[in-house]
Image (cartoon, coloured by chain):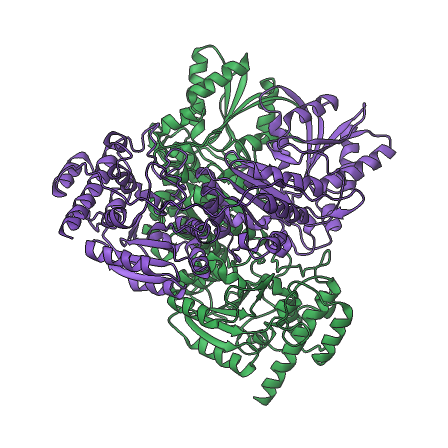
Chain colours: A purple, B green
Amino acid sequence: MADTTTLWKDLAAQLRIDSIRCTTAAGSGHPTSSMSAADLMAVLMTKYLKYDWATPHHPNNDRLIFSKGHACPVLYAMYKAAGVISDAELLSLRKKGSRLEGHPNPHVLPYVDVATGSLGQGLPIGVGMALNGKFIDKLPYRVWVVLGDSEIAEGSIWEAADKASYYKLENLIGILDMNRLGQRGETAHGWHGEVYAARFESFGWHAIRLDGHDLAAIDKAYAEAVAITDRPTILIAHTKKGDGYPPIADKDNWHGKALPKDMADDAIKVLGGEKNLTVAVQKPDDKKPAVVKPGTVTLPTYAAGTKEAPRKAYGDALVALGKAMPDVVVLDAEVSNSTHADEFKKAFPDRFFEMYISEQQLVSAAVGFAVLGKKAFASTFAAFFTRAYDQIRMAAISNATIHLSGSHAGVSIGEDGPSQMALEDLAMMRAVCDSTVLYPSDPNQTAQLVQAMAGLKGISYIRTTREKLPVIYAATDTFPVGGSKVLRTSGQDKVAIVAAGITVHEALKAHDQLKAAGIAVRVIDAYSVKPIDAATLKQAAKDCAGKLIVVEDHWPEGGLGDAVLEAFCGGPATLQVVKLAPTKMPGSATPAELLAAAGIDAAAIVAAVKKLAG
Amino acid sequence: MADTTTLWKDLAAQLRIDSIRCTTAAGSGHPTSSMSAADLMAVLMTKYLKYDWATPHHPNNDRLIFSKGHACPVLYAMYKAAGVISDAELLSLRKKGSRLEGHPNPHVLPYVDVATGSLGQGLPIGVGMALNGKFIDKLPYRVWVVLGDSEIAEGSIWEAADKASYYKLENLIGILDMNRLGQRGETAHGWHGEVYAARFESFGWHAIRLDGHDLAAIDKAYAEAVAITDRPTILIAHTKKGDGYPPIADKDNWHGKALPKDMADDAIKVLGGEKNLTVAVQKPDDKKPAVVKPGTVTLPTYAAGTKEAPRKAYGDALVALGKAMPDVVVLDAEVSNSTHADEFKKAFPDRFFEMYISEQQLVSAAVGFAVLGKKAFASTFAAFFTRAYDQIRMAAISNATIHLSGSHAGVSIGEDGPSQMALEDLAMMRAVCDSTVLYPSDPNQTAQLVQAMAGLKGISYIRTTREKLPVIYAATDTFPVGGSKVLRTSGQDKVAIVAAGITVHEALKAHDQLKAAGIAVRVIDAYSVKPIDAATLKQAAKDCAGKLIVVEDHWPEGGLGDAVLEAFCGGPATLQVVKLAPTKMPGSATPAELLAAAGIDAAAIVAAVKKLAG
């Protein structure tokens, strides 16, 4: 024990010193927020963490998430202590080309599972990882999440706390580094650990309060945590920001500041001088994840002459994927009977996870599953993904592959009114790095695009319409991502109508009315909003003297209209593009009345074509 | 008491009957979720609510928010019982042109303060209203928030719970209609009122459990709640969804369904038949809000030759507004030393509200202040407004006027890495109904735009840059919303460079380098991203043979580039637009290195111009 205590002391000193050294070398960063966690991390990595550093994606590895991502200097110092990065690399922190970014980023660093830095997201992602371990892979790994006290104010933490106890995630352990000081002064609850303890306990957790700088107390707390078998545990560790170097310890105005060289030198001296310990970390078990062999996907099909809602086709397609792909998991936010994710739930209850009405948790749990190799599909009303835009943005930084389905898009949902109408989802989802945005108009197309999503990398989004729509495609038609379908054309098209989803059907009606009036128009189904089919649009512009009408059930900003315009960037183009889209706040009425009021129904298209065709 | 009890019984029956009648007439809606709240509402409106129906915006009125907005049939039934809508109007529910939308909407209905329907937002907005009553207007009104049990899973509820007790909002009373059933079955906690009570108590609330169908118990609970003087109170009312009509009471699959005509007739009979009671509601006090007279704004100015960050100019301008406008309130999410909202805090601590790290609460509290007549400015890092996109979207539906400032935008923040870089905020904010999106490049311009925001209606957003930027405008220059500045032009411009914020300075550098190389370019500062200055862009396209380069520190989707393209919609245009924008996930490096890596620095602009100018 004496030896162990010495090791812990030395390692903790090294973690502090290295946190100081790398941030001072960078000239920025968060040494003080790292130092408060050093003792907790020293004991964790030498006695409790199980991790095979040679195989970061080993399915039995414990996962360690720094929800307080700004404290990554101590995480990187742990990597050095584990012997997987050199001292030289440690000192490359925050510099161009370094794997050690200002916040942990799995794009570049294999030991990091998810990007953090937007606070309050590590614990919710940890819930997804713990669900995966307990219910899907059935492996005994633990998920350790290091939390700051400021971030406990984020509602996403409480969404996670609720789901973690609901699913009895004993494999999830939070480590709250309660150092009292936030970015601009004291947090709302300071060192009142009893407040955090009472809250987590009321949310069904086992809470342990401890002195986060007492190595024996830390050891005891971890031992207690890993012995709990019926619920998640949170360690509430009373710590000091900047602990170990009195001139900055528990002092205001030391958040996110590197120590000047002279102070850094002094601090290193006070802490016992530079060290280059390499410590052993326990190897994990080598159990196999509970997976079964994949099969062949047989998609549902919908007969010509019938009608079906794209959201229903989404649910049906999920079932087809579920049968063939054992790694598909589905999550929903208490609206599965509307999004039709419940079709999957009925077929595969063990792979369906109800997140109740917590959309942030919905997306974060999907990210947790995704980075551990599952094909995670998450659904809610399209409007409510706005609740999780930060999580979606961060998922892209995490390099996570998640599949999102938003139902109830646009004014066409009708009577429920604008709070339920997604009119910004395409803009939001387009503006995500390397995202894919799909918007089907037909159930056969929907099913095929859902299957395509399962093979896409990154963030993919499908906008599924609430209303039943006529089947316009054969089950044998194919819909490559990045493609489009020219549904109507003649040798003499005057105008091309570009539509997607419900407006495709309005465009087809408009086509027939215009044809009867002797005006030939092209109708393009731009089901792939991102990437958009630039070639087909350019051909249409060429054939129609640049006259395009884009009609969409979405605000005019950022959606299909902007995607179409972007297709013409780069080269020269002569264009006359008319955007038809809702511009006033809609109310409650029938879908047909609202499409008309928004100026995106067949009559509005006909009028626009007549005006444009001149 | 016997008379009162009879009145309550009759009124509660009428509220149930009218909830059934109007939804059956509409053919859709939420009668069962209304019926569970009927007894609670009958006692509230006849004994505790203080409201002058003739003056919905009376500053002393209690505020009543249906956070469970789908239960609005009972709210509309209360309006009928108050005598402010007719039975005929009640029966217009959900029909085109009716003020009674599927969820409550203040666009059309003066008794509704804020739109609800996206769950978990009523309580956070109520916190803003209660803060206004307690700390700004200093009026004794109460804020009553009716909550559903499903929505308690939203993290935003716990952000609100935390802030409500932190600010000791005894004037905030939540009424939790715990009817056990969510949209697709039982909630996570069913009728376990002890779970909700323990959680709210741990968050510093006074919790009262009661039978929500026992009129005497309801009366007692309200009496207890209004007597609490040191913290907010939540009533946890055990209720039955569909209570009052046994065939649907506490039954699954009755969420959001109107009763068929025959069942409705039977239910009305069971409930004692149609009624047309009109009840008296207590009038509020007639105290005056604590306001002082406005003065004249004297904006800060910045001298030519100096540098300052737009975020600092934002803070300075807030102080100037604060001095002249007593109705300005400022909120921040624990980053006020970065957003520089702390300048206002130092000058006017009584009008500054720290929301800690809870961005959803930040925006919702601003909405609460806004709908009670305050000019609310809310700030955080631009990236973190993504956390509150649903709240921003809903604020637009609420017709609320709020002013948002997002600092730390784009790759130019440098070393902190992508988690802290807003690269989607312009897309997100453009896709909000009737929003204004501003992006200044200079501190004088920033100050003027902040003042302009204070006069704008709806959602306005300013993107303030982290880096210190050279002063390029005189303090006397003016910057109308919807305008732009042509910073460089000659009689022979080959290409127009459209920039905003930090890229304006790169464009100016590029201009000088190109001029030295004999290539004349126009430089346009498009500080008003929405509305965009279409006239200036069209003139530039005309003068430069359609050759435009748009350079922005934002993903290529939905931002300045798309705004510029939109300016050319409608009429014919010959264009060759090149978008320069980050397209790969950035890492950590210096601002200059990251601008270069993203292809949006002066060198990239010069190269693009040379290519385009041919």
Image location (x, y in percent) of residue A183: 31, 48
Image location (x, y in percent) of residue B274: 73, 77
Residue A579 visible here = yes
Q: Is residue B232 above or below residue B605?
A: below
Q: Quadrant of the C terminus of chain A?
A: top right
**Is residue A225 found left or right of A361 in the rendered image?**
left
Residue B167 visible here = no
Q: Is residue B233 above or below residue A7?
A: below
Image location (x, y in percent) of residue A226: 32, 57
Q: Is residue B33 above or below residue A169?
A: below
Q: Camera-side residue: B158 or B115?
A: B158
Residue found at the very far bottom of the displayed protein: B2
Q: Is residue B609 above or below residue A56?
A: above
**Is residue B166 found left or right of B16 in the rendered image?**
left
Tell me how many marks there are. 0
Image location (x, y in percent) of residue B32: 64, 69
Residue found at the very far top of the displayed protein: B518
- Residue under the point 75% across and 50% down: A593
Q: Name the quadrant containing residue A279.
A: top left
